[in-house]
Image: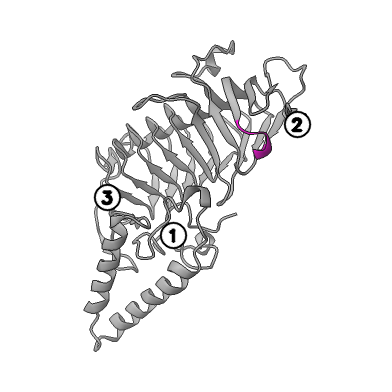
Amino acid sequence: MLRILNVLLISASSIGFIAVPLAAEVHVGGTLDSGGRWDQGHSPYVVDRTLLIPRRARLFIGPGTTILISPKKNTSKMPADSEGEGGIAIIVKGTLTCAGTIGKRIRFMPSAIGEGSVGWHGIEFRGAGEGNEIAYTDITGAQDGITVSECRPLIRAAVIERNNIGVNCRRLGSATLKNCVLTGNFVAAIRVAGANPVIENCLIENNPGSGLWGDGNSVVGCSYNCISGNGDGNYLDCDPQLGRMAALNRNGDSVDKAGNLACDPAFAGTMADSLARERYLARSKTAKVGNFEKVKRRMLDFADLVIHGSMKRPAPAKEDAGRFSLSPYSPCRNAGDPAPKFNNADGSRNDMGIYGGPGK
């Protein structure tokens, strides 16, 4: 039985935005004239033309929704400044709210993609207004996963992987990234040119290109992240103090002046998990009984491990099988920004990555 597209998307008479109700998918594209709501019940949504969210329009995407981008060449007859280079784009000048949850993530991905290539242009915020947010959302297979210019969207608990560039901040595109994972991006996880983004409590690791690629002039707020294992270097044309180990954090790990780690995050179930456990146990044995401060510190660490590390962590989404969840011994646990507003849901200090922070 054919499913009927909810009238909240757009009326059938609207020009420039086509919604074709099918049994298994909804086709969308063109200009979203007023607003809309996409939900898991009607997904997947197939974007088969560049989609423009104009000023004063808002698209809300609910938890668990899947958005597939057609591999077809973009044929949208839209204004020149709205065309996406490198394939179909989602261009935001109004408001886009992606409201995923820890157990029901939103997914943007190409419907078909060749190995080692990208299948669409990406999501682009162009001078968008306040209230733009991408939360608990996965973005993959794009030229630029997210491009930001002349606006400040919030991107939190997102997984941005296997794009050419994960997040491209340019021309006053000062996005805020919190508790995200950026991995497998071919050119750079984050590219900054003429912008001042804020990056906190994120895991930026194992990208074939650079971790954070600046322009030598932009001031980037980069603190309490784990940036490691990136093929072309963790930092390129950035503040020279970033990545230069200058102190030990409360867990006893080396950090730079902004609290950034440069080590394997030790995801649960990986070889790094076992190595992190061995390292933790070896550290515990080095505490001298006669040194009260060291003993006290190790006791506090052990309490954090038992109370916040394994027993009270939120369970990862079943469909992700714990992907990107941290080992109980990970150096990224309780190593994020110590400000109370960043605390985990159980009240402990922020864990880096998508399972850390206050959640919904």
Q: CA distance from mark 1 to mark 3?
A: 23 Å
Disc number placed over residue 351 in the picture, else none: 1
Mark 2 vs mark 1: give the one in front. Answer: 2
- Label 1 CA crowd tier, 10 Å (few <14, some 14–19, many 20+): many
Mark 3 vs mark 2: give the one in front. Answer: 2
Amino acid type for the residue under numbered disc 1: Asp
The answer to whether residue 233 is left or right of residue 226 is: left
- Label 2 CA crowd tier, 10 Å (few <14, some 14–19, many 20+): few
Amino acid type for the residue under numbered disc 2: Leu
| Most distant residue in the bottom direction | 290
Percent coordinates x, y for residue 145 in the rendering: 45, 32
Q: CA distance from mark 2 to mark 1?
A: 38 Å
Comparing 332 with 162, the one in front is: 162
- The residue that disc 2 covers is 8
Disc number placed over residue 18 in the picture, else none: none
- Label 3 CA crowd tier, 10 Å (few <14, some 14–19, many 20+): few
Percent coordinates x, y for residue 313 in the rendering: 49, 64
Check whether the beta carbons of the residues at disc 1 and disc 3 lie within 8 A of each other: no
Question: Which circle's residue, 3 or 2, is located before the other in the chain?
Answer: 2
Give, as a single range, the part of the protein colored magenta.
39-44
Element class at badge 2 = loop
Q: Which residue is at 57% across, 51% downward?
A: 103
| Most distant residue in the front direction | 1
The answer to whether residue 76 is left or right of residue 184 is: right
- The residue that disc 3 covers is 241
* Quadrant in the picture for residue 263: bottom left
